[in-house]
Each structure stands twice: as structure tokens, then as C-alpha cells.
Image (spheres, rainbow, N blue to C red):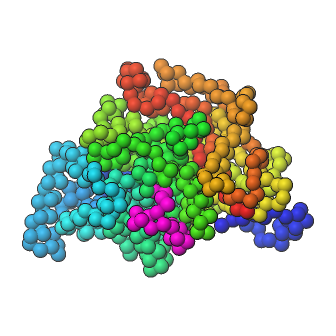
Amino acid sequence: MRTVRRCGHALLLATLLVAPAQAAPDQLLWGDTHLHTSNSFDAFLNQNKSADPHTAYMYAKGAPVIHPGNRARVQIRTPLDFLVVADHAEFYGALRHSVQRGVPTDGLSTWQGIVASFNGQILRLVSKWDYGRQLFAMVLPKPGATPEEVAANPPGYDLPGTDAMQRTMWQEAIRIADEHNQPGEFTSLIGWEWSSIPGGANLHRVVFTSADASVASQWQPFSSIDSMYPEDLWAWLEETSAETGAEFVAIPHNSNISKGRMFPEKSLRGEPFTKTSAQARAKWEMVVEATQFKGDSETHPDLSPNDEFADFELYPYYIQNDPPPYEANAADYVRTALMRGLAIEEKIGFNPYQFGLIGSTDSHTGLASAEENNFWGKFPRDSTPENKTAAWRTGRGPSGWSMSASGLAAVWAEANTRDEILEAFRRREVYATTGPRMAVRVFAGWDFDPADLAGGDLAVAGYARGVPMGGELTAASEGHAPRFLIQALKDPKSANLDRIQVIKGWVDESGEPSEKIYDVAGGGVRNRDEDGRLSAVGNTVDLKTARYSNEIGSAELTAVWEDPDFDPMRKAFYYVRVLEIPTPRHSLMDAIALGVDPSEVEGASTLQERAYTSPIWYRP
């Protein structure tokens, strides 16, 4: 955990002269930590029968592959630097194994063998007749019971032969991961998804490790069938790490549909945080997925009414049968969770929600397609515009146009290796984008000035006299406010930048969470209102052709910003949001291709892609 303290120039110079030089992370790596293949039961049931882990790695590396739905040849436009294949731990690879290889009966009793064979025949018929959506709907949470009740009384699954199939498919998947790992060129990180969803409350976590297959072969992924409680996942990670030496990261995702349970004040067991339980959560969950296919989890207009950009890629669909109306809760979103963490720290002395931010896809096609104009859908069924009108599951639910072509994980690392990427997550020197590869750096310190922007390399001054995103700033001197050194460069293949914003959060004297948004830099010639807010950048998108122009905005934005409302006695966090100028959304492109009015398809016609950096925390 990095800190910086205010000191005189003489002391600072002396410190720099005697301190050993610290390597500065100088590689910006792009990846997806949340990619599903045909080994995930829901992907397989929704027609992903061919895009396996090998396909996923090949696509991420830039090779052409066959789409599992429409069978077209597809290819990512810009290859990734790293990938986590994160198939569901629940029935890991078992449906694919059952249909394509049969159910093994070795070690089963006669009756169990009969049941296993019958189940295998049923699954093969479901696959052949394309009844996967109906079967998937049958296993979704039912209405009525609360998440707390379901977690305490989980449904049981007794499917003979499943354990053997899961072991086989896990061993194959980790072997393939090692085969694709190329240190310095491409990193394949071994992982899975723990998919707890009691009563329709999404509590999913992606787990990945820096370990290789020889180590990962010692365990079978912990699943929500083992337990629906996050605390039990953390306990398993603690025990497994101690036994094998493996290091892990657990990443919550889709907090936006957690029904107020992802960032709670009390656990599903009804227990308030203690310092010990807060430390356990922070140890494993140092990063949160803020944006992905199923919408954006930064904030919501109901929670941030003064944020003009809060109404972004909203996703009001709970994952359950006959879901209730959507309701945004403070425990569902990243910004309010960060504020809640400060309040909890005031009570127990530790912040359980001191986390960094990333984006990833949650693609179930095996294709990490976060590019708006090269988006291949959440499931294989969503790969063609004609299919997007149908809900991806039975009953009320989202269409293919509900899905966001988002996001990516950006990592500042010393090298493209498993160990260095995990270490970057551990220190939270990571950030999220909704797809475009904007290069963003942020440092906080006490004496940055415009001269530090000269030459374009902020890292020299930033690491020498400040802390990067994910770090901590402490011990302000009287009369000094923190200064932030910020740089954002556009994605060379994407749109110009609209603005840089700093989002500040704190807890006021009465204990109420507070937030404020500052426009600190804007592209082009802009006006500001009396509150300092920038005027709109404009919109060049042609709704008839889905083309846009970079004649507005800027290719690079920089700022040295000082907090004008700084209270040295009050804890706070700061993160940076960078917005692109408006560009066409995939829904507009589909509407034009189909020859229909854009209002006939779900989703906005244009959007402002963005980046969210990990916060920097100030501590008195």
C-alpha cells in the first residue's frame, strides 16, 4: 500500500538520494478477465458448442476463428495482451462433456449409471432440438424467497458422473491455458467464476490466479454449489493459498443487479462487518468489475442525480424468473460502495470497500468482443441483428441490444507476465474502459505543477513525488490541498476525448455520504457555467450512416488539478472519469443494417465511451 507524506524540499531530496530506485510500471496492458467458453453450462445451453478455451485464446491473440453461432469467420481488430477464461465453476464443462463425450459411469452404482445415462440422453436431445433456453430458465432463481433464505437453504444437485466430468474438463482447461501462455507477449491467466445468485441477487465473482497448471491441478474450482456465501469463498481462497502457495484475486461483477447485496453493511448471514471480516474481503477483492456486457455499475441516476453522465448503459434486468421491477440500491454501485466503505471504516477502523476498478466482457461466445463495431453478442444467438429482438432467455428479459459492447481491463505493469499482472491488481494500479483503449495515468501528490506535464512523461514526477491510481495519500500540511497529475490519450482507432472529470467522495460531518464531480479538462473550445461545468462537446454522429467525425474533442487531455474543497481532517477518495465524444452504438448500426428506425431497437443510438480509473484515497 503506497503512501506519500508532505515534507520539505531538503528532506525530499535527501530521501530520493538514499532510497533505492523503484521500478515504475511502464507497460500498459489490455485484457479481459471475464470470458466464458463452451465449458460454461449457460453458454453451452445457448448454442456455444464449439468455442472452447483454445478458441478463446486464439481470438484474443488476433487469429481468425469460427463464431459458435453464425459460423462466420471472425477476428478481433486489436489483439489483447492477456485473458482469463473464467468459465462457471458450477457444472464446469459437464454439459459439454455429457453431450459430446457421454457421461462416464466408472465408479458409479448400477442405479447411478442408469440415471447418468438417462441424464446424458436428455441433454443430447435438448442440445439437438435447441431447447437450451427452456432448460436454462428452469434452473434460474424462482420468485418469492429472499436471497438470505435461499443462501441458507440452497437447492441440491445430485447428478451422477458430474464430478468426474468436471475434473476432466478443468484439467484440460488449465493445460490449454499453459500452452497459450507466452511471457512477455501474451498472458493466459487460469481462472473461473463463482456464480452465487441467491434469490436473483447477483453475487458473482471471477477468480484468477498467477499459478500454472501444475499448481492449479491440485484443486477443483470452488462453486456456489459448495456455498452461496462470499465469506466461504474467501475462506476457501485462504485455505487453498496456504496449502498450495497459489495467489488469487476475486473480482465482483454486475453489482448493478445484486438487489443491494454486493456491497452491503451486513452479510447475507445478517452479520455486520468486523475488522477481521472487512480485512478478509479487502484481501481477496481488491478490484471490482465496473462495466461489462450486462451494463455499467459505476453509478445510477437515482443515486447520483447531479451527475449528467450517470444515465449510461443501464441494465434493469435481474437474473431470475418473473423478476421484480428494478430498483437501484446504494449497495449495487461502485461509487456509493466507495463512500460506504469510508463510513464503515469510521466505525470499525478498516475499509472493506477500498477497491480498484476494471472492465471486462462476460462474453459467453468465447470471443472477447468489446469493440462497438465488431461486437458479437453476449450469447451466440445474439450474433446477428435479426436474432437480437428475442430475449436471451424465456419470459421478461433483455434483448441483444440491451447488452453493452464493454469492457476492458487496463493494467500498468512492469512486464506482461502472470506474476506482474496479478501484482498490478494487488496494488490496484488498474483501470476500466468501456471498450476503447484510452491511455490514462493519474498521480496524486502535494507539489505537482504544470511543469510536470512537460515532455509528456508524467511517470517520472508521478512516482517520485506522488502515488498512482490505487494508492493512498496521507498527512496533509496546513494550507495544502492534494494535486492530481492527469493525462489521457485517445485510442488511436477510436474517437477524440470530450473531457476529464475527477469524482470525489467523502462522508460529511453528519455521517452522510457525499460526492462531487469536477470537470478538470475539456477538448476543443468550451464554455463553463458558474459551477465550473463544461458545456456539451457536441455530437457528429450521422444517424443514417453511423459515421462520426473527430473534428470535435481532443486527442490528448492533461491537467494539474487541485481540490478546491479540501478538508484535511476528512477521509476522501478520488477517481478519474474520461469521456469520449459521442459515437454510434452497436444498436444504431444494427438498425441501419436492418433498414428500420433506430427507435424500434432497444438502446441509445449514440453513447460516450469512457474510462474509470482506480481511486486514490486520502487519509488524514
- Tell whether 216 sits left or right of 538: left
Q: Main secondary structure of the magenta part?
A: loop
Q: What residue is shown at x 32% (from left), y 45% (from top)?
A: 323
Let me know if residue 320 is in the magenta part. no
Q: What residue is shown at x 41% (from left), y 48% (from top)?
A: 257
Let me know if residue 267 is in the magenta part. yes
* Residue 275 placement (x, y as % from top left): 55, 71
- Tell whether 584 sits left or right of 345: left
Q: Tell me which segment is drawn in magenta.
A: 262-281
Farthest-out residue, front = 510
* Residue 260 placement (x, y as % from top left): 44, 53
Q: Nearer the viewer, residue 476 or 464?
A: 476
Q: What residue is shown at x 47% (from left), y 28% (from top)?
A: 605
Where the N terminus falls, by quadrant?
bottom right
- Tell whether 29 sits left or right of 524: left
Q: Nearer the viewer, residue 378 or 513?
A: 513
Q: Nearer the viewer, residue 151 or 39?
A: 151
Q: Is residue 93 visible?
A: yes
Q: Is residue 136 visible?
A: no
